[in-house]
């Protein structure tokens, strides 16, 4: 016969009201968390304020001519960053297409039982180590390996399909394609790591239910797991794009630093981050004002991308809940 549960004598119950010490610690933790949020917001606004304050003289002096101009010649007081804006967006989007595809495929490969658990952990560590390599090393690797490796293919594409805008020029050295390839490798660890977390967060019962309905392994992955984790995967892509937009040294070494707007993958180009890094050391007072203007434009692009990405993820979460 089952014996009724009798609570032990004394004050040993698990469900007890918090003590005064626990209450104080909870309040302190909440206050510390709120203070941390306030500090982060204050840093963002302080950064915008400082850069904006130094950029206002350049904005008043040159106005929108800086954004719409195509010539950068401090000797003639001509400052145009439109080619740099184009190069920043073009190289980042190409890198996102390449790095996003391989990052998501790698996340699927490492989380969906294609490898033993220990071997998958080894590959995961190797991918994460890519994030620890300095960007200048990536730049040197791109100069001495990537450019010579893709030059024969680029020459063949240009000779055979020069009527296609993407192959209208030859690859003489640094250009958009080698810069985008190296940038894709640089953002790959971020996309792969966040995508893996998103796929691992999907409950195992969801996958088992898909198998119970008769799906194959790939059908369960592509029709159940990936759509369920799509919000987290999209967040990984947004983080990767933000990382690509702000990359400086590797692109300064590989993109060509040429103020021109072209669809050709092999033509040299420029980026906002490269303009800032290469011109600040020898900039005069007027040029510094314009460079701070360019930094404000780069910050606006990055913040806009992150805000739009956050809004899309928020709307998708609301749609999934409804």
Image (cartoon, rainbow, N blue to C red):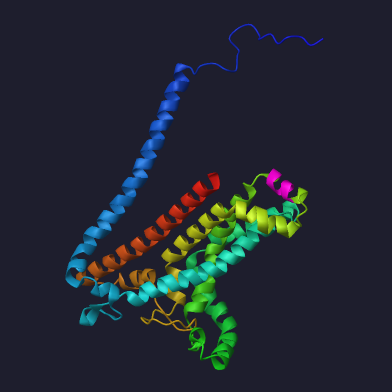
Q: Residue 267 at what x, y percent from top left?
A: 45, 84
Q: Quadrant of the N terminus?
A: top right
Q: Can residue 196 be seen in this view?
A: no
Residue sticking out furthest to the bottom: 159
Give the tally of numbered discs: 0
Q: In this view, does 177 lie above or below 301?
A: below
Residue 29 lies in what quarter of the image? top left
Residue sticking out furthest to the front: 322
Residue in the image at 47% along x and 63% along y: 241
Q: Can residue 187 be seen in this view?
A: yes
Residue in the image at 51% along x and 91% along y: 163
Q: Residue 37 at what x, y percent from top left?
A: 38, 41
Residue sticking out furthest to the top: 9
Q: In this view, does 146 lie above or below 319?
A: below
Which is more toward the observer, 225 or 84? Answer: 225
Q: In this view, does 33 lie above or below 300?
A: above
Residue 88 lies in what quarter of the image? bottom left
Residue 306 lies in what quarter of the image? bottom left
Which is more toward the observer, 155 or 65? Answer: 65
Which is more toward the observer, 109 or 284? Answer: 109
Q: In this view, does 319 lie to the left or right of 59?
A: right
Tell me which segment is drawn in magenta.
205-210
Q: Residue 268 at what x, y percent from top left?
A: 43, 82
Q: Does the magenta stretch include residue 98?
A: no
Residue in the image at 33% along x and 75% along y: 82
Q: Residue 85 at what x, y percent from top left?
A: 36, 72
Dominant SS in magenta? helix
């Amino acid at each position: 016969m089952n014996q009724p549960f009798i609570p032990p004598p004394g004050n040993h119950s698990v469900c007890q009201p918090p003590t005064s010490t626990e209450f104080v610690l909870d309040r302190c933790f909440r206050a510390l968390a709120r203070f941390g949020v306030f500090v982060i917001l204050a840093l963002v606004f302080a950064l915008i304020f400082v850069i904006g304050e130094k950029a206002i003289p350049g904005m008043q002096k040159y106005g929108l001519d800086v954004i719409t101009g195509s010539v950068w010649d401090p000797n003639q007081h001509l400052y145009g960053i439109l080619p740099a804006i184009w190069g920043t967006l073009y190289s980042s989007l190409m890198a996102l297409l390449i790095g996003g595809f391989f990052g998501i495929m790698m996340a699927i490969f490492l989380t969906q039982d294609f490898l033993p658990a220990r071997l998958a952990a080894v590959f995961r560590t190797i991918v994460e180590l890519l994030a620890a390599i300095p960007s200048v090393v990536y730049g040197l690797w791109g100069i001495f390996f990537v450019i010579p490796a893709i030059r024969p293919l680029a020459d063949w594409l240009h000779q055979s399909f020069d009527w296609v805008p993407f192959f209208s020029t030859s690859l003489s050295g640094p250009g958009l394609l080698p810069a985008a390839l190296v940038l894709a490798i640089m953002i790959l660890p971020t996309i792969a790591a966040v995508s893996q977390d998103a796929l691992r967060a999907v409950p195992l019962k969801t996958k088992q239910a898909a198998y119970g309905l008769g799906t194959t392994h790939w059908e369960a992955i592509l029709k159940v797991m990936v759509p369920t984790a799509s919000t987290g995967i999209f967040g990984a892509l947004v983080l990767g794009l933000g990382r690509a937009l702000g990359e400086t040294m590797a692109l300064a070494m590989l993109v060509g630093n040429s103020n021109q707007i072209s669809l050709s993958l092999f033509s040299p180009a420029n980026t906002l981050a490269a303009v800032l890094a290469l011109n600040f050391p020898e900039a005069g007072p007027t040029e510094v004002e314009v460079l701070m203007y360019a930094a404000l434009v780069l910050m606006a692009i990055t913040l806009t991308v992150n805000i739009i990405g956050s809004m899309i993820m928020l709307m998708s979460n609301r749609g999934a809940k409804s």
